[in-house]
Image: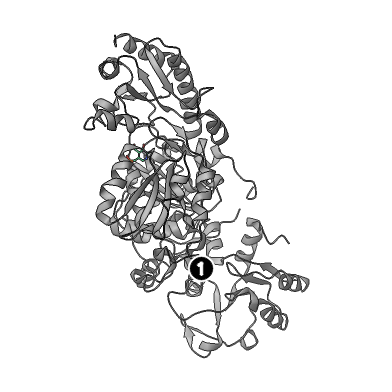
Amino acid sequence: MDHDHYSDDYIRSILTSVKSVAIIGASAKQVRPSYFVMKYMMDKGFTVFPINPGHAGGEILGRMTYASLAELPEPVDMVDVFRASAAVPGITDEVLAMEPLPKVVWMQLTVRDDDSAKRLEAAGIDVVMNRCPKIEYGRLSGEIGWSGVNSKTISARRPEVRAGFQSFGIRNK
Amino acid sequence: MSQRVPGFDTLAIHSGAQPDPATGARTTPIYQTTAYVFNDTDHAASLFGLQAFGNIYTRIMNPTQAVLEERLAALEGGTAALAVASGHAAQMIVFHTLMTAGDNFIAARRLYGGSINQFGHSFKNFGWEVRWADVDDPETIASQIDDRTKALFIESFANPAGFVTDIEAMAKIAHDAGIPLIVDNTMASPYLVRPFEHGADIVVHSLTKFLGGHGNSMGGVIVDGGTFDWSASDKYPMLSTPRDEYGGVVLHETFGNFSFAIACRVLGLRDLGPAIAPMNAFLILTGIETLALRMQRHCDNALAVAKHLKDHPKVEWVEYSGLEGHHNNALQKRYSPKGAGSVFTFGVKGGYEAGVKFVEGVEIISHLANIGDTRTLVIHPASTTHRQLTDEQREKAGAGNDVVRLSIGIEDVADIIADIDQALDKTA
Ligand SMILES: Cc1ncc(COP(=O)(O)O)c(C=O)c1O
């Protein structure tokens, strides 16, 4: 896997197949990027499990917070990492101990650890590093263009409209 | 298809513009509305808190405007853009995002006259100091940079004579000092020059000119190159520190490589207010679809006219960087191999009187203060834009008594040349 460049197809297939996400480093503070991402993912229909030992037992955006992946009450499709790159090897150990394994480990912007990626991939887990799922979802749905951001996609197909006003889903090609 | 990188002409037509989800309209609709319905209070809160993408109020964003923004970001190769009411509004918002009272910035002395006014006079009222520099003598830039210098500002092709600036050299000076390079790319357009490829960090345009291209709409844009590290120093608190306006959000941390464009929108445009009209965004979008065709024709026509003038007995001199042997020709070939643009100056024999007679003598060329129209335009700065100055001041500003500025249009070039010839005949 080339972790410097991901194809839109690869990212699209992840964001359209994953249904549940554990967010390591989710914050209860409304101004933190992890809060923005968690809220957006929930709006898009993902089932989110915040993980934050300092907030365990409390709720973030109405969702129960867990101290670690090991304490999750049910399997998740994806683990999203909002921690510094140095924490990734330890998180990888925890991921590889999960039963069943998640299908995807996603690391946020600036987070990258190539050795951990190799270990995860050897276990059959897809890896995305140094990307934000909110930005990628916004790009592949076209929503990010509403803020003048370059989605780097063009299409003559109809956007995928979700319920309510101003909500696009990821367009099938 | 998704991994093919579309070419410039394809991006000029498609970027940002998917079919309208409600109606299937293929051309971008003019969303002539001031505000947008929320699903519920939580949706409203997400929008106001910058947590969701979406529209609130047309002073801050509008769907027609958004298509224009994404298209310009794509054409310049930037991460994001913000469209505003005029080129001057774009400059005001850029500096508002970078500066506080007591700060300064360095600007090339060779700039559009309106920018010289804006920087030298109006900005003074905000406590922002401009320090003029000679881009041909980089030492005059570096020696003026101090702790409170926040940016370096140049034009890619400088109005009025169209001289090409050495963008890479300017980027190096700016980056050595830890400040961004801002390039006004109005006179070149991204068809000819893409400043981000040469190290610029922010690009601004007057969309009023070649991008709109038809002389029918005012507009401006700020494009974020996504390359500058706003948190590397404490110079840019709008981006690097918690903003009370949004409950403590740090914009650079939250929006990463498109945070400058977001800051310009959610702080600058929101609070200062120069929003672009949706109708104008639509007209400019339509213009951009033919940018490549028009711009090439502008360049080809201008070169033919410049060559003709160079050999004309009633013409003293021609300043067009596209002419072989012109002192700026090497830089033009390096930065803008497809052409030297359409705006340039020439000196008519007979000074002030002859200049006045020439602009009064043209018949299909329009005598007005603008550039970048399908029509060929002319102005005699000494009797119009620079009339209030002394002879010496005019000379320094490149607006001497004999100077005539042309903005060559896309008419049949033989007709442009014939009109120039008959007007020159009337000068003496
Ligand atoms: C190079 C350049 N920059 C900026 C501007 C200002 O743009 P606007 O008139 O859209 O405010 C102009 C207008 O003539 C220009 O020529």
Residue B375 appears left or right of B252 = left
Above or below B115: residue A70: below
The image quadrant in which ligand 1 is located? top left
Q: Position of residue B121 (x, y in %)?
A: 26, 47
Residue B57 appears left or right of B301 = left
Q: Kindly indicate the quadrant of the structure image that contains residue A105.
A: bottom right
Chain of the residue on which disc 1 is drawn: A
Q: Which residue is mark 1?
A: A44
| Kind of residue indicated by mark 1 | Lys
Q: Kindly indicate the quadrant of the structure image that contains residue A76.
A: bottom right
* Quarter of the image where the N terminus of chain A is located: bottom right
Residue B267 appears left or right of A68 = left
Looking at the picture, tell me which residue is in the foreground, B198 or A26: B198
Looking at the picture, tell me which residue is in the foreground, A49 or B319: B319
- Residue occupying image coordinates x 53% and y 42%: B11
Question: Is disc 1's CB within 8 Å of ligand 1?
Answer: no
In the image, farthest residue toward the left: B388
Above or below B425: residue A151: below
Above or below A65: residue B201: above
Q: Position of residue B405 (x, y in %)?
A: 35, 25
